[in-house]
Amino acid sequence: MDHNAKISQLLEQVDVIKETEEKSQEILRSNEELSMQIKDMKYLLEEKEDEINHIKEKEHLTTEMSAMLDSAYNEFNTLQGKIHKLESQLSSSKMLNIEYEDLKEAYYKVIRELDESKNKVNHYLYENQVLQIELGKVEDKLTESNQQRQQLQKKVAYLEELNNDLHQMTDANKKLEGQIKRLGELESKLNIVAEERDRLREKQGTGS
């Protein structure tokens, strides 16, 4: 009876082993799904990095336009100084009116070009502000994506550790199944020996 009780307990443990193996399969499927999610997150991160590089490139162009505007201001100031100098010379030397008109026309042309450059710079500055706002949003999304990726990596590490434990339990359960099988064989042999012993007793009883 004790031997049969032990066998019953071992059979119950075999059922537990089967349930553990089913759970192990479910965990493996969860690992695969998490791996796919991590790949998707990496793809999104690459796209966000490309957007950030594009925004930085536009910001660099805006900086160059600002430098060009500063250079245009300097040229304008230089030309204005020359005009004032020529105007003072006109009063004293009575230069020809046609030269003065040409110079004045050049002056107005520079002013128009300066206004156009100023409008372009203002436009680029506005675009730069918009891009800065977009960059902030992208960086926020990137930070959120990094946090999600770290959480997923922690889950995957936990599941991998759990999976390793399940593999160890599976190996131990396989050994236990071998022992159960061995006990069954021993029980069969014991039954055979008991039957032979009963036969011998019957023969001895009949002979006497």
Image (cartoon, rainbow, N blue to C red):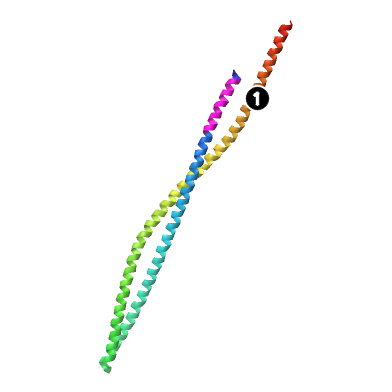
Q: Which residues are magenta?
A: 3-19
**Residue in front for this viewpoint, 197 or 34:** 197
In the image, what residue type sits under mark 1? Glu
* Residue at the image point whose x is 32% and y is 66% from the top: 126
- The mark total stands at 1
Q: Image point 52% across, 32% down: which residue?
A: 19
- Answer whether residue 120 is visible to the viewer in this image: yes
In percent of width and height, residue 54 lies at: 41, 63
Residue ID at (74%, 6%): 207
Tell me: 135 left or right of 26.
Answer: left
The quadrant holding residue 127 is: bottom left
Compared across the picture, whether 139 is left or right of 84 comes to right
Disc 1 residue crowd, few under 14, some 14–19, many 20+, Cα 10 Å: few
Residue at the top extreme of this rendering: 208
Question: Which residue does the image show at 49% across and 38% down from the upper left?
Answer: 26
Q: Position of residue 74 (x, y in %)?
A: 35, 78
Residue 14 included in the magenta stretch of the image: yes
Task: Give the image location of residue 114, x and y in percent.
Answer: 31, 77
Dividing the picture into quarters, in which one does residue 13 lie? top right
Q: Is residue 24 above or below residue 127?
A: above
Q: Which residue is mark 1?
A: 185
Q: Overall secondary structure of the magenta stretch?
A: helix
| 93 on left or right of 19 | left
